[in-house]
Image: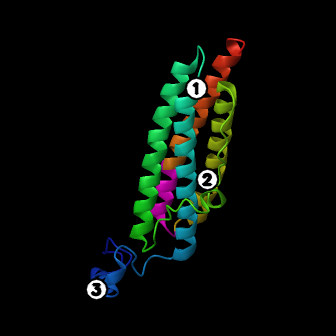
Amino acid sequence: MADQPFLTDIKTIRERARRHIEQGAVTEGYTADRENVIRLLNEALATEIVCTLRYKRHYYMAEGLSASVAQAEFLEHAQQEQQHADWLAERIVQLGGEPNFSPEGLMTRAHAEYTEGDSLRDMIKEDLVAERIAVDSYREIATYLGDKDPTSRRLMEDILAQEEEHADDMAGLLDGLDAQGR
């Protein structure tokens, strides 16, 4: 065993790869509760869809002297949230699941809320709250996945890192409004 670079000999890996090939990327070595992982990823997908929609609304509805800076952030974040949704949908399919894009029940599946906000300040606050929700829930999902599904865990960690950046961006915009006395 000390001479082998693998924990499992290659012959065994090859034999296992030929069994259940219809399961694609999900091999016998996958130890997570696949159905629960798919459910969690679909919840994250719903969260990203809701965030995309909220950012798009805020992009179009932002008004005032500080609106152009905020609009640029809103649009960038909307595009990044859509990319997250695409990554999540792709992973769900890799796991043999179906990404749930149905608008019916979207709000109950999403962790974040869709709150429009009446002013630029309200929009930024609502986006910051949603990002903070995503940060906490995605961190918990990544921790839950642990070593049982390292691919999904890394995906959630990558999305989490960008959500933390989004939260920082929104906090900066809010500070900017406060500095201007708005």
Q: Residues within 10 Å of mark 1 (few under 14, many from 20)?
A: many
Is most of the magenta stretch helix, strand or loop? helix
Image location of residue 148, percent across then percent down: 52, 70
Q: Which element type, helix, strand or loop, lies under badge 2? A: helix
Which label sits on residue 18?
3
Say which label, 2 or 3, has the lower sequence index: 3
Say which label, 3 or 1, has the lower sequence index: 3
54 vs 31: above or below: above
Q: Nearer the viewer, residue 96 or 164?
A: 96
Residue at (47% x, 33% y) in the render: 75
Say which label, 1 or 2, has the lower sequence index: 1
Question: Is any part of residue 33 visible from this angle?
Answer: no
- The reply to whether the C-beta atoms of the residues labelled 1 and 2 are less than 8 Å apart is no
CA distance for labels 1 and 2: 30 Å
Residue denoted by label 1:
62
Image location of residue 182, percent across then percent down: 71, 15
Magenta range is 148-158
Residue denoted by label 2:
139
Which label sits on residue 34?
none
Q: Which element type, helix, strand or loop, lies under badge 1? A: loop
Q: Which amino acid is tagged 1? A: Ala
Q: In this rendering, which labeled residue sits more in front, label 3 or label 1?
A: 1
Q: Is residue 163 left or right of residue 129?
A: left
Residue at (62% x, 61% y) in the render: 109
